[in-house]
Image: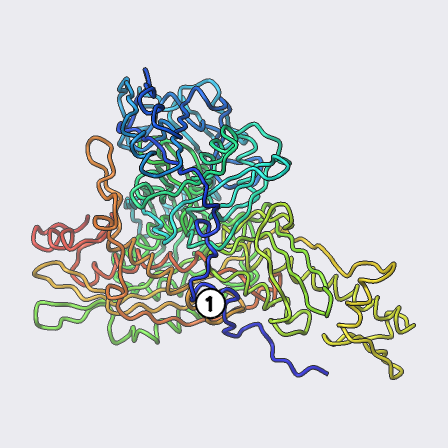
Amino acid sequence: MSTRKPAVNRPVPKKDALALLTGQPVYTEDLAPKDCLVVKLLRSPHPHARIQAIDTEAAAKIPGIFIFTYRDVPQKRFTLAGQSFPEPSPYDRLILDQTLRFVGDAVAIVAGETEKAVDQALRRIRVDYQLLEPVLDFRTARDHPVIIHPEDNWQSLMEVGADPRRNLCAHGEDRHGDVEAVLRDCAVTLEQTYHTKANQQVMMETFRSFTYLDAYGRLNCVTSTQIPFHVRRILAHALDLPKAQIRVIKPRVGGGFGSKQTAVSQIYPALVTLKTGKPAMLIYSRRENQTASSPRHEMEITVRLGADQNGVIKAIDMQVLSNTGAYGDHGPTTVVLTGHKAIPLYGKTAAYRFGYDVVYTNKMSAGAYRGYGATQGIFALESAVNELAAKMNRDPVQIRELNQVKSGDVMPGYFNETLGSCSLDRCLKIAKEMISWDQKYPRLDLGNGKVRSVVVAMAMQGSGIAQVDTASVTLTLSDDGFYSLRIGAADMGTGCDTVLVQMAADCLLCPEANIVVSGVDTDYSPYDTGSYASSTTYVTGMAVVNACEKLIKKITAAGARHLGCAVEAVDFDGEQVEAIHHNAVISLKALANQSLRGNHPPLSVTASFSSPISPPPFMVGMAEVEIDTETGVITLLDYVAVVDCGTVINTSLARVQVEGGLAQGIGMALYEDIHYNAAGRVSHNSLLQYKIPSRLDLGQIRVAFESSYEATGPFGAKSIGEIVINTPAPAIANAVYNGVGVQIRELPITAEKIYRGIHDHATAF
């Protein structure tokens, strides 16, 4: 019998670690043919304009230059959002449009043999613009006299409350009980408005894709993406091609964080290749990544809370205004999570109401970013709960202990799911002990003009999109007894390839090294909706478990046939099939090689999984900050995170996920701000202006896991990818209040805001 160690719940090194460490050519640009045409975009200098005339004659005289304008592209509108069909996001884009809707919108596509020639051609193109009035303030966008999408062929495939004539990308309301009646009966009520800015994902590898025609004339797209199968569908629709004529290949991805759930870069080189027959590559510059990409949605959220005299929260009302920018990619879906991934944290509410408007503006189109709307909603709700605790003169930890959702609760605010697994109560207790809450809350005056304070925030997320996300894997026993695992999930640096192999290894009772995992190629990989919505560990993981179970049955049956036994009379231990009642065995290697000869059924299976529920992971975050009362400078000293993600599959990768997510959450809280000037231009268009935290800015980060067991998940696992970004903003904001009495309700939290609050005797910003 095998004496192998279990793979799950161990720090197994990433499958691609050595290749990445030694700089092997594994990324999109590394793999591109040397004769690729260089593709660049001429971009609009205006937030809202219409092309009156475009003169490309001088640019076209440069040898080897190709130029395409709105006259050269299909007139079918589409969405770039990587979502399952039918997409909730509206079809409101053209590859190139005569109307331009933000500074950075594409005016023309230029391709050439060298970057120098392309840059020269871009400078020679002359465009006559009719300037239109822009809508830059999302608070005034709804029912504004300027309509951003007046076109007749705007289309929405799903009912999301959209009305482009009102600049509404989506509108909706969900409720349970009578909020107004419950609020009237509450002993204490609170109403506040919170504002979160747009944030950039700032992945190391910018958007990039290259395309070519294969020997059969099919369009091949090699691209850094989270959504290979959705990219295939988007290209097919936008270019008016059958899907069978398109192949999408995903190499290693240098970070995504949700940004690459939008098909930002693929369409332009694809058009060039189809028009010229030549391979073509587009690489976004960092400036383009900052000014023409898919950042987090800016939101303004008004929260009303009501509690009884004991601190039990009885009513929650959240009203959200979300800025989708020039196009509706992810607009109707991101906003839904703002309420539905925050309100259910509190399990004793008698009523809730959640309403939202998503509006078009003449700013860069927003998209997916880790947390996907929950981050904004949790900042608002958790800040409000902390303010409610202060108003009642109650410890915010005690308020949460009293109100938090528990396993077995039915969650009306979470689509009426029954919570099957939750250790939020234990997470709160452990975090409180780790940060020495009782000794530090609410503040310590150091006597030198500086104070230290602590505060708490809770968060939840989901594990895939219930009844939508689908994952498939193909598992094959190959010659010599090793396994080939083909997946459709996109590893974007998270290590999902490794995590899925760990699960398969424990199911198949073999070493991880005995499993070869293959990345995504839409011609050969089984279908997967993609790596987003915290779906891979839970959804694709269950597909792996299902595939292993099916393959073991096939292996056992094949072994039984060879040994002349009934299936019930043999056992498989990962290395051999053995007859239980007599001394006869066949090794896995012999069985694999035998299956390749003669008329033997292949030892290969494909299995899939889609879940009717989305089990939420939970997290408690506690921050300790130091504030200089003379200057307002805030320093993060310590951040404690305790996470319930179910069974931790890879202890090392899970810890890295938490630490990385916290760093992004801290950046959102303290530094990051996409700032527009009066002309609609992004001022923070490089990493010199757009500040992200370095390791020196993060203080001490401490991570602990307090696992529940999710019976519907693989090995009891839930997700971890997004939950980890959600607590820093509300925790740090309310630590400022505990320290100096200034409540920050608009991110980022800056020394200037704190200083003005202290010295101008203001109480909130």
Q: Is residue 342 visible?
A: no
Q: Residue furthest right?
A: 564
The colour scheme used to paint the residues is rainbow
Residue 503: x %, y % from top left: 61, 67
Q: Is residue 599 above or below residue 13?
A: above
At 29% from the left edge and 49% from the top edge, which residue is drawn?
A: 190
Tell me the residue that label 1 is attached to.
653
At 26% from the left edge and 43% from the top edge, which residue is drawn?
A: 674
Within the image, what quadrant is residue 4 found in?
Answer: bottom right
Q: Quadrant of the N terminus?
A: bottom right
Given residues 506 and 727, the one toward you in this image is 506
Residue 454: x %, y % from top left: 26, 67
- The amino acid type of the residue labelled 1 equals Leu
Q: Is residue 552 above or below residue 95?
A: below
User: Left of 244 or right of it: where is 419?
Assistant: left
User: Left of 165 or right of it: where is 128?
Assistant: left
Given residues 181 and 316, the one toward you in this image is 316
User: Left of 344 or right of it: where is 115?
Assistant: left
Q: Is residue 550 visible?
A: yes
At 89% from the left edge and 74% from the top edge, which residue is drawn?
A: 563
Residue 259: x %, y % from top left: 41, 46
Given residues 376 and 16, the one toward you in this image is 16
